[in-house]
Every structure is written in structure tokens, then in C-alpha cells.
Image (spheres, grey):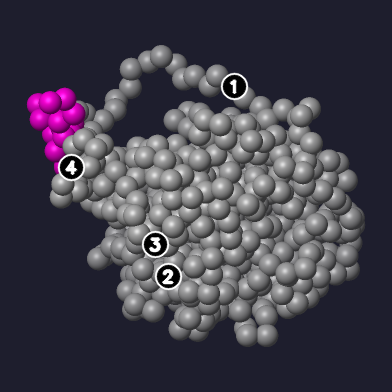
Amino acid sequence: MVDDKTVRYIAALARLHIEAADEGKFARELEAILHYVEKLGVLDVTAVKPTSHVLDVENVFRDDAVKPGLSQEQALAFSVDKLNGSYKVPRVIE
Amino acid sequence: MNHFDLTAHAWLDLFQSGKATPQEAADAVLQRASQVNAKTNAFIRLNDKVRAQGGPCPVAIAIKDNICVNGHLTTCGSKILEGFIPPYDACVVEKIKAAGGIILGSANMDEFAFGSSCETSAYGPARNPWALDRVPGGSSGGSAASVAAGQAVWALGSDTGGSIRQPASFCGVVGLKPTYGRVSRYGLIAFGSSLDQIGPITKDVKDCAKLLAIIAGFDERDSTSVNVPVPDYAAALVKDVKGLRIGVPKEYFIDGIEPDVLAAVQKAVQYYRDHGAVIVNVNLPHTEYALATYYIIATAEASSNLARFDGVAFGLRAAPSKVRKNPLMDMYEETRARGFGDEAKRRIMLGTYVLSSGYYDAYYLRAQKVRTLIKQDFENAFQACDVILSPTSPTTAFKVGEKISDPLAMYLSDVFTIPANMAGVPAISLPCGFDRSKLPVGLQLMARPFAEDVLLRAAYAYEQATGWHRERAVL
């Protein structure tokens, strides 16, 4: 059962602020979708291996060679706040 | 036929014979794009001018707004990427530029490709050129609408659960989702990483083969790119389906398909039967679980992929007027609250929920296991046939606003396209007629992994015999 409290909990995990007035709407919509996906419960999957991707490959590595990449300046260009070649974020420690 | 309605191969013939230049062609298409964009909103951004640079395929193209173009604003249809100008080209854009391709602008899309109607775009909905009060489908709705309206010769879209094929179906054009691993996603803003593929949206199958040939191939910058040779797709374009085994799955012919859609698709089956293909009944018994599986896996992957949009490295940054938790957490939460639309928030929360402690096994792990069953369905079916045939979507284009307030009803629009992404197989949608309101109907064909050439052959033979691809929307 998804209620307002669940919405607040998931939203906090997802770093998403949800206005109190919208919690009920999201709760109802998520509840409806979760109810729909519960149909998977009728299948017996105890002996089935999970598929995380469809390709028959693993551990894909490229050669460990230095190649041109973005400069520090380019990488920082789109941040709204930066300082001394770093991203700047609001203070976390008092 | 108007100049802006020409296919890429028709333009290339005109260039070859000296009857037109690439610059004239690109100018004509750009002019058309500007003239009708107020009606279709197919482009979020159009370039002011275009310049032909030479190359073997100097054709004007629309690029979906989730594919990075160096120096051009790329926003994924979202406010959270406002101001993001990629400092590099996606692999597919590099390849298009190397072929001489002329980029017209950014095609409209559902925000982060979350939608089946192009209505969740932060830049306003795109409209269907066949009926402006109807949706073009989604999420690559702008790409499909631009091609159907003559605003682009062809376009790139991306397909996670049908986002190329369903809008191609709704707009009466051809759209192909390649095999997972066939086309590099380097520079595609990720949605569902185990499902996403970039593919062509074109006016006919010949153009589809041509554009696929340009973008396909191995790229070490995408670790899911597969190093297998790219066949000569043009050589697959033969008007012959004799001996081809076409599988018709009964699970795709269910209640809820509009009668006109069903009739058009059944006529396509008849075409193949009449021309020497072998029609076989196949079973894909887990089809009815594909949508539920998809909405667990795709949202789980999306919630993880979209964690990067936190106001730090790019895009929007916002802060609440007073402290709620602490300044950093508040910045993350407020940035994401203001930057994402409701459907993005819904999917992020759903994905977070199914991955959260206590629910992971019941939802995510179970869905991954059902995905195995769906994949096995296809492996079994392809023992008995070469191509699987179905409608692309149960309906033709629906009205703007009709399904936007009911997420589940919207999701059902992708019920026939999602399984191909779950199994990683290639699939194409091509026009197969019209309903009684003159809205296009799409036929879907699916094939074994890396058998895009088989799809193109089956599609080309049908298209050339029926001529549906020659119909154009009038704007």
C-alpha cells in the first residue's frame, strides 16, 4: 500500500522534494502502477536466472591508453557555481 | 510531389544528375520546417541556417533532443538540462557529419523519453501532421512528425520500449529499432541502459537501410556496442519474400486492438501469404507480462541514470527559500523538483521504490527473471520463423490530452513494442494503411538479433507492392 508517508520516504531516497499537496496524487498513481505489475506474482520463477542485459558479453575493457578528453575548463563550463577548478556546492558542515 | 516530401535517395539522385544541390535541398527543407513548426512543434530548436559541407550523403536530418550535438543546446525535452551545450558529438552524430549530413535542429520528445505521446515535453507537445489535434506518438514524436511533415528528410530517434516504432506508426513513416548493441549509444542521454537503442526514422524502407548503414557499427566508447560486421543493408532490398517464414503470434492479436488496425495488419499477412512467404503460428506466451516487467526494469534503470541530474555539474540549480533539511540536500531536492516534470518524477519514484530495501527481490529481481522468460519466448519462436509480424500499436494516434492523466492507459500504447526491447531483438514499423479517419496504421516486424537485413527485405517487398509510404500528410 502506497500512502503519503511512502511517497515522502521514496522521494527522500530519490532526492526529490514533493509538495505536500501532491503526495496524495503520486501515492494513488504509484499504487495503481504497482497493483498492475503485481501480475508478475503468478509466475513461478524460482528456477529462472535473472537477465540484466541481453548480450552474451562480460568485463568489456578498452586498452589502458591515455587519450584526449575534456579539459578541466570544458568539464566545468556548465556548472552554475565553481571555485578553483572544482564544482562548488552549498555548505554541508557547519 | 513537393520538394520537402522527397526521400533522401530521391534527393541523392537529383544531386547526382545535377538537378539540385545539397545546399538547395537543405534550404528548402529548413524553410518548410520553419513554416510549419508552429503547427507541429516537431522541433524544439531549429538552426537559423544550414550549410552543406559535401560528403556522400549530404541530407538534412532532425536529431532527437537526447542525442548530444557538439556546441548545440541538448535538453532531453527537460527543464533540468536548460543551458546544457555538449562539448562533444554523440557517436551517431559524428558518423552523420562524416557522411555530410546536415543537422536541422533538435526534435521534440517526451521528457527524458518518458512517454508515448510527446506530451510530457517541457517545451510543449508535438502534434501529428495527419491530424493536428492528435499526438504524434512518443517518445520520438518530434522526430517522426518532422519526417511526416516534410520538416526533415529523415531523423534519428531512440527506442527504449517503442519510442521509435510507435511514433513512426502514428505518423505514417518508417522507424527501426536496431538490435541491442548494433548502434553506439555514446552521447545518448541514458534512460534504460539495458534497453536503449538509437535508430532511423525515414519516409521509406530504402532510406531506413541507408541511414542505418551510416550509424551502425562497433564503438569502443559504448561498452554494450557489439563488434560484429555491418552487412550491406542496401543489398537486402529485394522485392522477394518467397520462402520467408513469417510468424504470427496469437498473443499480439488481442481484444483492445482497433478493428481498422486489425484489418490493415491482417491484409499485410495476406500479402505475405500471397507472395510466397510461409505463414506460421508462433507463441510468445509471456507477452502479457512484458509491460509490467518493463515498467519495473525501465524505471529502475531510469531512477539510477537520472541521479546525475543534481544541480552540480550541469543544467538547472535551484534552492528553496528556507532551509528544510540542510543546504546541500535542499539544493538537490529543489533542483530535481523544479527541473523534472510529473512523469519523470513518477518514474524516478517508481524505480527507486522497486530497487529499495525490502522490495528489490519482490519487484526488480522478479522482473529480471520474467525478462529471461520473455527472451526465451523469442528464441523459441525464431526456431520456427524468420520474422514475427504484429501491429505496432493497438490503436492509431489518439487525441492530445486523451491519456495524459491516466499513466497506465498511456503505457498500454507500447504493449506490442516493449517485448523487442526486453529481448534485445531488432524491430521495424512501417505504414500498412489507414483507419477510417485517415490516420496511419503501423505494421511491426521483428527478427533475430543482428538480422536487420531480414527485416529490411520483408519490409521493402511489402512497401513496394503496396505503396502506403507514398502517402503524405497535408499541412
Q: Quadrant of residue B368?
A: top right
Q: How crowded is mark 3: few (under 14 residues within 10 Å), some or many (20 or more)?
A: many
Q: Which mark is residue B323?
A: 4
Please state which of the two labelled residues, at mark 4 or mark 1, is closer to the viewer: 4
Q: Do the residues indicated by labels 2 and 4 lie within the same chain of the protein?
A: yes
Q: Earlier in the sequence, mark 2 or mark 4?
A: 2
Report in which chain the residue with disc 4 lies.
B
Residue B388 coordinates in the image, percent (x, y)? 78, 53
Task: Give the labeled residue for mark 2.
Answer: B126
Residue shown at 45% from the left, 60% from the top: A25
**In the orientation shown, which residue stands out farthest toward the left?**
A84
Segment colored magenta: A80-94
Q: Earlier in the sequence, mark 4 or mark 3?
A: 3
B13, above or below B32, in the image: above
Please state which of the two labelled residues, at mark 2 or mark 3, is closer to the viewer: 3
**Magenta run includes residue A90:** yes
Mainly helix, strand or loop, the magenta region? loop
State if disc 3 and disc 2 touch (CB < 8 Å): yes
**Is residue B378 shown left or right of residue A19?**
right
| Amino acid at pointer 2 | Ala
How far apart marks 1 and 3 lie (CA) works out to 36 Å
